[in-house]
Image: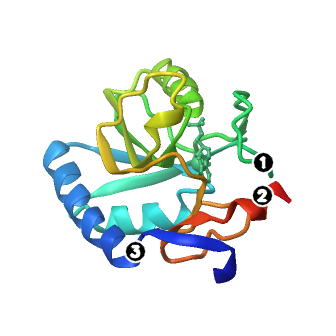
Amino acid sequence: MLNSIEKVLLSENQIKERIKEMGASIAKDYEGKDLLLIGILRGVALFIGDISRAIPMPLEIDFMAISSYGASTRSSGVVRILKDLDSSITGRHVLIVEDIVDTGLTLSYLIRMLQDRRPASLEICALLDKPARRLVDVDVKHKGFTIPDHFVVGYGLDYGQKFRNLPFVGILKPEVYSK
Ligand code: IMP
Ligand code: MG
């Protein structure tokens, strides 16, 4: 697994430290409010465990699954709901938690869809932001790291469903996906 990685972009420790800061700032934003985190599966699996534990206040967690890249490294722009929320979000303070914002297509679609359900507020928290490939403008309120235009894996992010379990975020060797 490690020999498919060109370079470690964000170490386990860098991620940990940044999440501490993000958690504190989220807690400040939502003080005294009923907060619902919505994790977007599957890439968020590792991040949401850590970020939720870094927010020292009562909150709820729900998940949505949407179709993404399949086994390729490009967004098709087609977003399909594979699993909807179990909770109602009407009148609630909702924070969408995502692994990475790339073209922005996924999140802009989700925002429109969830806005229709009339939450009290709707914001985005993303561990990574890759602005170089943005096609649609999305406002990410809580952002972990801005990264250059490389395909990255680890800490929840996959290539062909693999590499999610790497504890760091690394750049995949191009030969792995050009094969
Ligand atoms: P967007 O709709 O292009 O913003 O795509 C967002 C989704 O694409 C993310 O939630 C990831 O699942 C996936 N994605 C985008 N860039 C990467 C990457 O560098 N590595 C792994 N997955 C990525
Ligand atoms: Mg994702």
Whether residue 149 is visible, yes or no, is yes
Residue positioned 44% across, 22% down in the render: 137
- Mark number displayed over residue 40: none
Eye-nearest disc, 3 or 2: 2
What x and y, as percent, mark residue 1? 69, 80
Whether residue 1 can be seen here: no
Q: Disc 3 marks which amino acid?
A: Ser
- Mark 2 residue element: helix
**Residue at x-position 35% and y-position 62%:** 51
| Disc with the residue nearer the chain's start (1 vs 2) | 1
Specify the quadrant of the image occupied by residue 81: top right
Q: Which residue is mark 3?
A: 11
Q: Which residue carries the number 1 mark? A: 72
Q: Distance of mark 3 from mark 1, alpha carbons?
A: 25 Å
Is residue 50 placed above or below 104 in the rendered structure?
A: below
Q: Nearer the viewer, residue 74 or 69?
A: 74
Few, some or many C-alpha atoms within 10 Å of disc 2 (few <14, some 14-19, many ≥20)? Answer: some
Left or right of 23 on screen, residue 123 = right
Q: What secondary structure is found at the residue carrying circle 3?
A: loop
Answer yes or no: disc 1 within 8 Å of ligand 1. no
Q: How far from the left and from the top, in percent, is residue 164?
A: 62, 68
Q: Secondary structure at mark 1?
A: loop
* Mark 1 closeness class: few <14, some 14–19, many ≥20 residues within 10 Å: few
At label 2, the amino acid type is Tyr
Q: Is residue 135 left or right of residue 77?
A: left
Task: Name the amino acid type tagged 1.
Answer: Ser
Mark 2 CB lies closer than 8 A to ligand 1: no
